[in-house]
Image (tube, helix red, strand yellow):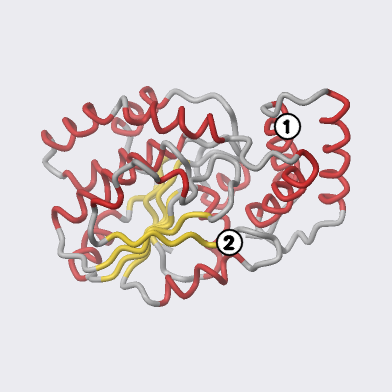
Amino acid sequence: MKTNTKCIECIENAARRTLSLLHIQDKEQLRVMVKVEEYLSGVNRNLTPMEISFGINEIMREETGIYDPFKAIKEESNNNAMKLMSRAKKILEESEEPLFDAIRIAIAGNIIDYGMKSDYNLSETLEGVMEKKPFINDYLLLKEKLSKAKNITFLADNAGEIILDKLLIEQINQMFKIDKINLIVKKYPFMNDVTLEDLEELGFEEITNVKIVALENLTSNNYSKLIEPYIEQADMVITKGQGNFELLYDKQLRLFFLFIVKCEVVKDILISEEEDVIIAYH
């Protein structure tokens, strides 16, 4: 998805929220924002919002010396999601369609997105997602393809959300014979997106068919091109989050997108409403 003016405004707001977390003086925040605005004024808008935001992350690291501004928030997000695990597992135990409910639980985790906003209520979102029908619902096709798949690529999104993604992966393994799942995460800190370091002590090493792949999320690399080999070698691909939708949906790669609509631009693309639940094959 190409970046438009509304996307630039959203990216700039996310940069301001990030700077507010760094506990640096107002004068220093202003200095860094000037650098960010200079970058945005000349950026190639053929890039996706995610790829443009990589550049802002690099500016902030270089200008402030702070490697991971969201480290504490990501840990808190994981802890918040862990608190819901007993409730989520009970939903699956009582479910007549546990795969569908595991997908919806994982989608509820997508509300944890500091690129869009800093406040969320995961418990309320879980309740809301479980009560509403997906606006786009390609679940039956997803289930059919899982029944034939041996090699899956799973593009992760945010910390916290990854806890509920793990529950989905475990449900998939319980129902289907999958030889390999490539779990794609980012190599370097980027907003509250999950990185290899963030996965430590979450138990993914106990899932024997999961291979974690950390890809370099830098403006000097074409991030979507780095993902494509893992898409091409997979029997099916599941991508989490609106950012991955923006990155890949117009490439016609036949992927499953699982996310909550969180912005006007994506809402207009899908002719949906904000907060709609999406299980889409495209």
User: Real-space Cα distance between discs 2 and 1?
Assistant: 23 Å
Which one is in front, 164 or 70?
A: 70
Q: Quadrant of the N terminus?
A: bottom right
Q: Is residue 208 left or right of residue 134?
A: left
Q: Amino acid at mark 1?
A: Leu
Q: Amino acid at mark 2?
A: Glu
Q: Residue at x 88, y 39 (%)?
A: 34
Q: Residue at x 29, y 52 (%)?
A: 205
In the rendered view, tell whether residue 245 sits above or below residue 90: below
User: x, y (%) of residue 2?
Assistant: 68, 59
Q: Which residue is mark 1?
A: 19
Q: Is residue 237 left or right of residue 70?
A: left
As helix, strand or loop, the secondary structure at mark 2 comes to loop
Which one is in front, 105 or 16?
A: 16
Q: Which residue is mark 2?
A: 216
User: x, y (%) of residue 26?
Assistant: 84, 23
User: x, y (%) of residue 16?
Assistant: 74, 32
In the rendered view, tell whether residue 109 sits above or below residue 268: above
Q: Quadrant of residue 25?
A: top right
State yes or no: discs 2 and 1 in contact (Cβ < 8 Å).
no
* Count of numbered tags: 2
Q: Earlier in the sequence, mark 2 or mark 1?
A: 1
As helix, strand or loop, the secondary structure at mark 1 comes to helix
Q: Quadrant of residue 192?
A: top right
Mark 1 is surrounded, within 10 Å at the Cα level, by few (under 14), some (14 to 19) or many (20 or more) other residues, namely: many
Which one is in front, 239 or 29?
A: 29
User: x, y (%) of residue 68?
Assistant: 61, 40
Q: Quadrant of residue 237?
A: bottom left
Q: Is residue 225 left or right of residue 95?
A: right
